[in-house]
Each structure stands twice: as structure tokens, then as C-alpha cells.
Image: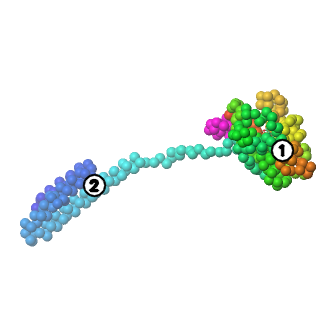
Amino acid sequence: MKEKLQEIREKALSQITAAENLDTLNDIRVNILGKKGELTAILKSMKDVSPEDRPKVGQLVNDTRTVIEGKLTEAKKNFEKAALEKRLSFEKIDVTLPAKKNKLGHAHPNTSVLEEVEKIFVGMGYEVVEGPEIEKDYYNFEALNIPANHPAKDEQDTFYITPEILLRTQTSSVQAHEMEKGNLPIRMIAPGRVYRSDEVDATHSPSFHQIEGMVIDKNVTFADLKGTLETFAKELFGEDTKVKFRPHHFPFTEPSAEVDVSCFKCHGKGCRFCKGEGWIEILGCGMIHPNVLRMSGIDPEEYVGFAFGVGLERITLLKYEIDDMRLLYENDDRFLSQF
Ligand code: DAH
């Protein structure tokens, strides 16, 4: 019996040492310690052992079982440890790898320039207001003293929705809306989108932006208009910018003018940017025509005003020295990310 136990023990230990994986270990456990295992068989045959030898033999069987179980557990642990290490080596995360950069968006150049313009006028006490893009013919033309036969009213130039409703062609349409509110005096700028039936090219688009400005108060003069626009031009384009007022005609202002700024690229010498002129046109303006005031219920004997209209794209292109307006609309990230 003793030899048999010794034999089982040695066989078990050498099998465990030779085992290659957890399955083999399990087979060994079943073959030796399982219900029909060799050691279990010996336990079953204890009844044949004489009562006085039984404790000794029992002790021996238990010792053998403990040794084999200990060895099995140890081998199992080793296998599990090796398996874990292998898995971890596969799943290893390289924390030094640079993370993928998230691209952050930023303001469109038009937006940045508009914000700058708003800041300049808010600083001079102006309110920023908005008007509708889908507009009545009345506000876009009639209330601005534009006669029914004016070429701008042609279908070639204006997008009509019905004969009376259109897509506004100018932010000047906001003027009468603000006057009708009756809150005088008025100091406002009205930025927004306008529409014209134009083909797309480097300087035209069927949809672009303007910023309208309007002041109505008692004793407003052309000198106030000049001072205001000069301040605006210097703040936007630089302190050494010169401003020139050229007589012009708009139906809604009298007198009217166009404003040029000295070319900030060549400082007036003449270059490709200003087409050799030394000056660049940036806006139209004038003293509000008495008819316009009267139509919106303001007495031109009591109140006077001035107005101006700036093309937002035009000043954005100038400020950033961009030579094709289409770039502002294509939303090509390679272009936009430069600003
Ligand atoms: N609305 C004019 C345009 O689209 C620009 C303009 C000129 C606006 C003179 C004004 C102004 O307020 O006084 O060409």
C-alpha cells in the first residue's frame, strides 16, 4: 500500500511538471483525485486494511493527496499567471503615443470683420438691429425714394417672390422699419444678408452682406457724417488711413457721396491692389432725403439724419488682402484656417 501510494505520488508529480496547459492539469486531477481516480480507489479499499493500520494508512493517503493538490494548485497558478502576462502584452497601451488632434472651428473672416465693425459703432453709441431678408417692395424701394422705373427694380437685378415681395437687395430696407418705430433719436447699424440677381465671379455673388448705418437727430450735419466715417475707417484700417468723399447719387440721400480710403497696401502710391489709383472705394453715404423721413412719419423740418451702406465682403477682402470673393463662400478649410 505504501509503495503504491509512493508510486501514485511520483507519477502525479512528474505528470504535473510535464503538463503543458490547464486542460492537461485538469485531466491529471480527474485521473488521480476524481471519483474514479487512483487515489480515490485506494481510499475505497481502506476497508480491507486492518483496523490498527487504518489510521496510519489514512494519514499517508491524506498526505499524498495534500502534496498532489498543492502541486496542482501551484502549477495552475503558474499557467494562469503566464496567460495573463501574455494577454497584457497584447493589450498594452502606448500612453506616449500622441493623441489625435481635434480640429477646433473658428470665426469666418466675414464674422470677425463684422464683429470688429459692430464694436467700433457700439463704441460710438450705436445700436445693432436687424430687419427681414424677405421684404416688401415698399421697404426695399418705395420708402427709400426709389422711383418705380429705377433700373435696380428690374427683374434682371432683383429676385422677386411676388410683384410685391422680394429678397432685399440692400440693408437700406431696414431704415424705414426703424423710423416707423418712432423712437427718436436713432443711432443704428443693421448688418445682414442681401440678394441680387448677379452671376458669381471674383467680385460678385447673388448673396452677400451689407452693413447699413443710420443716425437721425436734431442738428445732425454732413460734418458729423464725415467725422463718423473717418473714425470708422481709421479704426478698421489703421490710424494713418486717409478718407476721401466723392460726390455721388443715391435716391435716398441728398447730398450723397461715395467714400474712398487710401490704399493701406501702397499708402496712396498706386499698386495692383488699388488698381493704381491709390484709393479704394468702401461705402456709399449721404444726408437722408427729406422724402424718406417724411414717408416714415418724421418731420424733416425738425429732424435730420445721415445714412451709409458698407459691403461687408468688400472690407473683409481688403482687410485680409484676399483677391477673390468666392473664397469666402466655398468653406474650404485650407483657406479658412488661415484666419
Ligand atoms: N444701399 C446702397 C447700395 O446697396 C448703399 C448705400 C448708399 C446705403 C448710400 C446708404 C447710403 O445708406 O446713404 O448700394
Q: Which mark is residue 75?
A: 2
Q: Is mark 1 within 8 Å of ligand 1?
A: yes
Residue 131 visible in the shown view: yes
Q: Secondary structure at mark 2?
A: helix
Q: Which mark is residue 196?
A: none
> In what quadrant of the picture does the C terminus appear?
top right
The residue under label 2 is which amino acid type? Ala
Q: Nearer the viewer, mark 2 or mark 1?
A: 1
Q: Give coordinates of residue 305: x percent, y percent.
A: 87, 47
Please tell me which residue is depicted at 57% across the width and 45% down the height of the picture: 102
Q: Is residue 175 left or right of residue 299?
A: left
Would you call the spot at circle 2 few (<14 residues within 10 Å), some (14-19), or many (20 or more)? some
Please tell me which residue is depicted at 89% across the width and 50% down the height of the picture: 299
Q: Give coordinates of residue 338: x percent, y percent.
A: 66, 39
Please tell me which residue is depicted at 12% across the width and 58% down the height of the picture: 4
Q: Is mark 2 within 8 Å of ligand 1?
A: no
Would you call the spot at circle 1 few (<14 residues within 10 Å), some (14-19), or many (20 or more)? many
Q: Give coordinates of residue 289: x percent, y percent.
A: 87, 43
Please tell me which residue is depicted at 83% across the width and 29% down the height of the picture: 277
Q: Which residues are magenta?
A: 327-339
Q: Which residue is mark 1?
A: 307
The residue under label 1 is which amino acid type? Ala
Vertical arrangement, residue 56 with respect to residue 80, above or below: below
Q: Quadrant of ligand 1?
A: top right
Q: Secondary structure at mark 1?
A: strand
The outermost residue toward the bottom is: 52
- Front-most of 155 and 309? 155
